[in-house]
Image (spheres, rainbow, N blue to C red):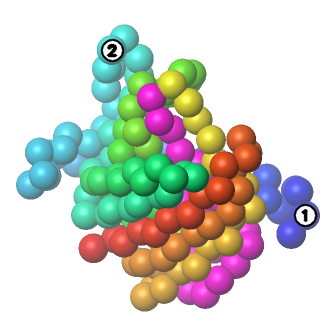
Amino acid sequence: MTRPAVARLVVAGTLALVAGAAAIGSAGANATGCSPGGKVQDGRYVQVFCGPARATIVLGSRTIRFKPGECRRTKDFTTVTLGTYTVGNPPIARYLRIVGPRRDGTTRTGAVTWQLPGASDGITRARLTLAQEGTRGSFAGRSQSGLSARGSFTCR
């Protein structure tokens, strides 16, 4: 895949994130006690994502679990968004976003980004495998900072 195509995938994923944030912002609190939408936390603007999605990422020897979150499928993309996105740097919360094509199967066009308190990282050409109509999947690759990263997610 060419760099312009990867850039389009990342931009489309970002647009899906913004659209999802707008939809979530109008929803009420769910059974997990999660209150979705934008808010100010520790003097910073954050966007909270709620829903049944869960994910695990292994960075080197460190395992990090993310929940709650949401999964969305559009005509062209599958997007999984978990945790609390911090606008600007440095991030103050945990957040994970996985973006790939809509179709099930394995591709090298996935993008996985994450925020941990104080640091952001991601995989721009992740090996992404989607199954069960995008409701489950796994990913792997080397992050921009050089870490070996792998993980999985479920939307139910």
- Circles 1, 2 touching at the beta carbon (< 8 Å): no
User: Mark 2 belongs to which amino acid?
Assistant: Asp
> Residue 84: x percent and y percent?
37, 38
Helix, strand or loop: magenta stretch: strand
Label 2: state its secondary structure: loop
**Residue at the spot x=51%, y=53% of the render?**
61
User: Mark 1 belongs to which amino acid?
Assistant: Thr
> Residue 150: x percent and y percent?
56, 63
In the rendered view, does 64 fall on the left or right side of 41? Answer: right
Depicted 129 relative to depicted 141: above or below: below
In the rendered view, does 116 fall on the left or right side of 141? Answer: left
Image quadrant where residue 154 sits: bottom left
Earlier-in-chain disc, 1 versus 2? 1
**Residue at the spot x=43%, y=88% of the render?**
132
Q: In this view, which residue lies farthest toward the front? A: 61
> What segment carries the magenta color?
97-117
> Would you name the residue on which mark 1 appears?
2
